[in-house]
Image: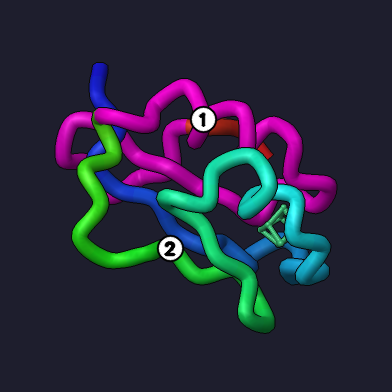
Amino acid sequence: MAITKVWLDESENECTMCGACEAVCDAVFEVPEKMVVKGGVDFAKFEAEIKEAAEGCPVATIAYAVDGADKRANSY
Ligand code: SF4
C-alpha cells in the first residue's frame, strides 16, 4: 500500500493555516496561506511523515490516497 496522492480536503472542515503539517514534513507541505502540497514529490519517500501530518492536522483536512486511487484512504 503506497501513498500516490495527497491533497487538501475541505469537504468537512477548512484548513486553519496552523502550519503543523509543514513543521512535520516541509518536503511535502507548505502553508503560504492554506496548505499546499508541493509538486513533483515522490510521496513514497515520505509515507510516515505524511501519515503523521495527516493524523496531527487539527481539522483533518489532509487527505491521502493509495495505490493510484482517487478515494481518500485516511479517516476524517
Ligand atoms: S495541519 Fe491541517 S489545518 Fe494546519 S496548515 Fe496543515 S492542513 Fe492546514
Where is residue 30 drawn, in percent x and y?
A: 55, 65
As measured in the structure, the alpha-carbon distance from the residue carrying label 1 to the one carrying label 2 is 13 Å
Residue 37 numbered mark, or none: 2
Where is residue 17 drawn, in percent x and y?
A: 77, 70
Query: In the image shown, does 58 or 76 lie closer to the viewer?
Result: 58
Which span of residues is magenta-colored?
45-73
> Is 38 left, or right, of 29 in this rendering?
left
On-image quarter of the N terminus: top left
Q: Secondary structure at mark 2?
A: strand
Query: Which residue occupies 62% across, 53% down?
Result: 22
Q: Which residue is mark 1?
A: 49
Query: Which residue occupies 65% across, 55% down?
Result: 61
What crowding class fits label 2: few (fewer than 14 Cα within 10 Å), some (14-19), or many (20 or more)? some
On-image quarter of the C terminus: top right
Reply yes or no: does residue 32 show up in magenta: no
> Is 42 left, or right, of 23 in this rendering?
left
What crowding class fits label 1: few (fewer than 14 Cα within 10 Å), some (14-19), or many (20 or more)? some
Vertical placement of 75 versus 33: above or below? Answer: above
Reply yes or no: does residue 63 show up in magenta: yes
Determine whether the beta carbon of the residue marked 1 sits less than 8 angstroms from the nearest atom of ligand 1. no
Query: Which residue occupies 20% across, 60% down?
Result: 40
Query: In the image shown, does 65 or 24 lie closer to the viewer?
Result: 24
Where is residue 65 drawn, in percent x and y?
A: 35, 40
Amino acid at the residue labelled 1: Glu
Q: Residue most toward the top?
A: 1
Q: Secondary structure at mark 1?
A: helix
Amino acid at the residue labelled 2: Val
Earlier in the chain: of badge 1 and badge 2, it is 2
